[in-house]
Image (tube, grey):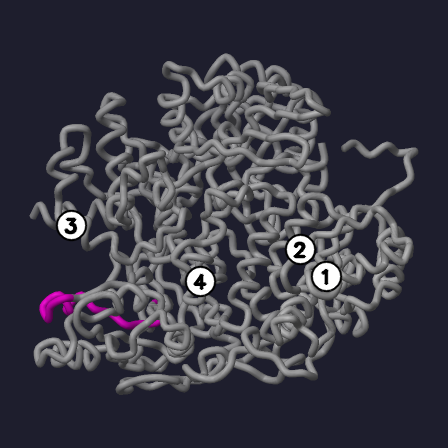
Amino acid sequence: MYKIAKENLSALFRKISETMGLYLPISSAGQTNFGAWAEDADVDLTTLKTVKSAKDTFFPQSENLYTCTTEDKKITVTPEKLQEEDFVVFGMKGCDVQGIEVLDRVFLSEPVDSFYAARRNHGTIVALACNEPENSCFCNVFGIDCADPKGIADVATWDMGDFLYWNPITEKGEKLTAYLSDLFEGADDTAVDELKNSIHNIVDKLPYSDLSLEGWGGDALDEKFNSPIWEELYKPCLACGTCTFVCPTCQCYDIKDYNTGNGVQRYRCWDSCMYSDFTMMAHGNNRTSQMQRYRQRFMHKLVYYPANNDGVFSCVGCGRCVDKCPSSLNIVKVIKAFSKEAK
Amino acid sequence: MSINQNEEFRPKIVAFCCNWCSYAGADLAGSSRLAYPADVKIIRVPCSCRVNPMFILRAFEKGADGVILCGCHPGDCHYSTGNYYARRRMTLLFSMLDFIGVENGRTRVEWVSAAEGVKFSTTMNDFVAKIHKLGKNVRLGDLRCKN
Amino acid sequence: MQELITRAKELLENGTVSRVLGWKVGDMPYNPEPAFFDSADTLDNFVYNGFCGANLSKYMIEASTLEGKTLVFLKPCDTYSFNQLLHEHRVDRDKAYIIGVGCKGKLDIDMIKAQGIKGIKDIKGAEMSDACDTLTIDTIYGEKSCAYSKAMLARCHVCKGKEHKIYDELIGESKDTQDQERFAGVEYIESMTPEEKFEFFRNELSKCIRCNACRNVCPACSCRKCVFDSNKFDSAQKANVDSFEEKMFHIIRAFHVAGRCTDCGECSRVCPQGIPLHLFNRKFIKDINEFYGDFSAGETADGDRPLTSFTFEDVEPSIVSERG
């Protein structure tokens, strides 16, 4: 365990960005999102949840795959370069870290997504414990400890007022710590343990902390799929993509072409199962009603994904959809509606 | 197209011209041997009110440096009233572009009749000179179109 | 609120309406959701309080296709949207039974959180029967309080008025909440230099994640197929790029609703990134008022709309550069 005085954090960021990329929560026009660090960036480590999750840093909302350019009658195809530079994502919360783990199971299993894999290989995750989890948080329901972010995180950190405590977990984390060692001083664990306890106390009091996932999982397919409750639940849904775009685990994308005037850029961008043209094919669409689209999102998170991934849910309880849905719909209401029905 | 630093800036101008007046006006300018810069690319439209605000934004997005809309004089529309609607739309659109910080000389509406070859040529010369002064359109272009 | 439930039950039971469109109690005190109620007993979950900000007019497009009448509860500002939809033949007046409900300003949970109130468990004082000056908020850190007006949605501070423009009956009291100049925000931006304006909108719009919430919630955006959803249009809806495309989306969207936008403020309410989208719409409204005379969309269901009418003496587009 190491520690660094908070006033030295900008020196730490500068040191990191001397040799690698650095992404961290930055406040711009009143909202905090992950962005690239710059000397004049307004770094915001106090906001509990960035609007979009940190998913962007490994799986950007929109990225080029290749570019075709025409010159006279010649067409040149240039594949987009894979990530080559090392980078650090600083300040990811426990839920976001688990979110990346969920993406790993999709993109790193065969066939491996080379763009994503390159970013994962070059990225070091520095997680930050949540000092004050909010009323929309329910990560504990999915077994995540926001007071002690572990999982695939390379370094765990704690904000202790004047100091940031720093604990490398993996080899990558050790390497980063060694690189930054001039800035650190040694520290003992007791203070962190106290903070963890106080965070756990907050978590226990949160309104969603006792949410039960009973009945969900890979085996529940028929029963959940055919339930009449969906008909009622989906009604207020506006079919916007807010929930899917702020979600740390939604991983569906679409591939499109952009005509640049002298060629084509093929890019992929996040897609949303809420949209009417989601998985549109030559014959038309698989899901023709909003009810089916709405059901797809929650079935994917709570049934299909666990069925294919050893029972791991594809929701991490970050509560972003709870905060952001224009119609106040969310996964918690879905889970609660089903458990009410079961009684 | 890559922009060579040493090369002189040649603005790209899109002119939407109504089939009945302005396009004929451009024809007249040509047959009367009145010169106007080759930077002006004319797109013929059935009526000035055919021009959706999106056409104008798309022209800018794809790299135009200036967009001008030419139609029949108010009262002379081939379809009676088309240009009156166009007038309202363009007024509001130009005001919006001004609102988001786009230099307001980049857009223009001019009424040019089929008999006004001279007006067509002077308008275009004047507009191109103005865009020349404003320089490259950086605010409304799509970065992806620049390579 | 009980009065609304009782009346709704009456109308359902006597067969005047086949369903009720209102708000359903959420799992937390601050998140009621729009809902259809088909029977009298489900109405026990009906709620109408300060957090019922959603404009139900848009749901009436779908309800107009259903069998029988729908009882809909509309706040004063929602009636403007309903009128405008009526003007465009997107809703059926004969399929709607409108109860105008009172409004004392609607609340924004984010405004409460912005005051540092965290760990919210319960909120009291948002009920319509209350005087609506103070909210008492029970949090896991103890009891907090917050002035009602400080927790209101930004749009309620520039409220157009609490008069219902269309209704079958009225229930409940309203309270005037307007305490700011409606066009002050637009004027502030107009006074900037082009560079400042561009910088302002670049910062705001670069946050856009193209989730389309603004479009989907907008009662004026009622096209069956949006131009930005078209597969043939190569600026596809889903791409999120920070160059011009996002700005184009928002300018075009605002333009498509220009002269039809009732300034209900739903776009800014739902934006997950807090982009002040209403500024675009309000700029168009201000321009329309200045150039073509005062006009408020949705005040009546009939009459001309500014972009589908004209006068011979209209100003020329060159006014934009002339006025400086």
Q: Main secondary structure of the magenta part?
A: loop
Q: Nearer the viewer, mark 4 or mark 1?
A: 1
Are the residues under badges 3 and 1 in a single subunit?
no
Among numbered discs 2 and 1, the one appearing first in the sequence = 2
Q: CA distance from mark 3 to mark 1?
A: 55 Å
Answer yes or no: do the residues labelled 2 and 1 have beta carbons within 8 Å?
yes
Circle 3 sits on which residue?
A229
Membership of C44 in magenta stretch? yes
Answer yes or no: do the residues labelled 3 and 1 have beta carbons within 8 Å?
no
**Highlighted magenta segment, given as a residue range:** C38-51
Please tell me how crowded label 2 is: few (under 14), some (14-19), or many (20+) other residues with Cα within 10 Å. many
Circle 1 sits on which residue?
B69
Indicate the position of residue A90 as horizontal and vertical percent values: 55, 31
Judge whether residue C289 can be spotted in this image: yes
Q: Amino acid at mark 2?
A: Ile
Indicate the position of residue A343 as horizontal and vertical percent values: 7, 48
Circle 4: element type: loop
Task: Tell me if A333 is positioned left or right of A338 in this view.
Answer: right
Residue C128 vertical placement versus B39 (above, below): below
Instruction: Please give the label number shown on residue B56.
Output: 2
Q: Chain of mark 2?
A: B
Q: Nearer the viewer, mark 2 or mark 1?
A: 1
Q: CA distance from mark 4 to mark 2?
A: 21 Å
Residue C162 vertical placement versus A279 (above, below): below
Circle 4 sits on which residue?
C221
Please tell me how crowded label 4 is: few (under 14), some (14-19), or many (20+) other residues with Cα within 10 Å. many
Answer yes or no: do the residues labelled 4 and 2 have beta carbons within 8 Å?
no
Residue B124 vertical placement versus C63 (above, below): above
Membership of C284 in magenta stretch? no
Q: Residue at x 72, y 59 (%)?
A: B17
Q: CA distance from mark 3 to mark 4?
A: 29 Å
